[in-house]
Image: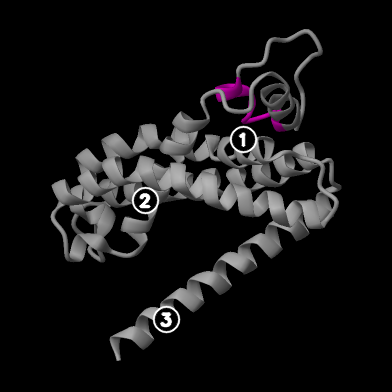
Amino acid sequence: MDSISRGERLRPWLTMLYSPRRTIHQIVKTNPKQYLTLVASLGGIYTLLNQLSSSEAGDHLILPLILIIAFIGGPLLGIVQNNLLGRLLHWVGSRLDGKGSVDSVRAAYAWSFIPSIWVLVLWLPAIAIFKLQLFSRSIPSFETDALLSLGYIAFFFVELIAGTWSLILFVANISEVEKLPILRSVAAIFLWLLIIIVVLFALGALVQGLRF
């Protein structure tokens, strides 16, 4: 994965895609907060677009409102998510002898979204072409428009690849900044996710209890 020659200048927006360890090492060594807000914000937009799509928000909301939520709420979500979940991830990693600082772990978390952030470029034409279908149960049919249907499938296939690659980068980045073996990094991320799920479940149960 890390195929950059020793003298090559690292450009995080590109080199993170194929040389995450050396790239995150440079980011952390120089300034872990550089571009952090921007990267976290873009990651938040991507996350919220996908959440709105998977929750079929288009069945209840008009497209302009969905886009306002995604492009205004997304940056806020990304920044808050990186700050809170990044700190939680640092705490979990430290329990497993991780050596990274809070800022380095937050940077590792944010920059792992780079493949997904690049896919944001495809969201703009996809929204123009598929409109509300991106966010609803209604999808292009092969019977009515085979080409449009293939384009729809191809878009979400690219999304799947980007999401998978982001996960791989996430593990590599955490391993690098925490100075942990891959398996222990995976364990840290798993425990981190488990805590998040438990907290969300508890909050959901609390809200349901307050309703009654």
**Residue type, label 1:** Ala
- Mark 2 or mark 1, which is nearer the start of the sequence? 2
Is residue 19 within the magenta segment? yes
Give the structural element (helix, strand or loop) at label 1. helix
Q: Which of marks 3 and 2 is nearer the N terminus?
A: 2
Residue sitting nearer the eye, 154 or 183? 183
* Residue receiving disc 1: 107
* Residue at (61, 40) in percent of width and height: 106
Disc 1/disc 3 C-alpha distance (Å):
32 Å
Q: Does any portion of residue 27 appear in the rendered image?
A: yes
Residue 170, relative to residue 54: is it above or below?
above
The Cα atoms of the two marked residues, 1 and 2, are separated by 20 Å
Residue type pointed to by label 3: Leu
Residue under pointer 3: 206
Return the x and y of residue 94 as percentages of the image width and height: 78, 51
The answer to whether residue 142 of the structure is visible from this angle is no
Q: Check the image and report above or below for 197 versus 212.
A: above
Q: In this view, does 74 lie above or below 186?
A: above
- Percent x, y of residue 40: 48, 37
Residue shown at the point (53%, 30%) measured from the top left:
36
What residue sits right under mark 2 in the picture?
48
Mark earlier in primary sequence (1, 3): 1
Label 1, residues with CA under 10 Å away: few <14, some 14-19, many ≥20: many
Residue 62: mark: none
Using the rendered view, name the quadrant where residue 101 is placed: top right
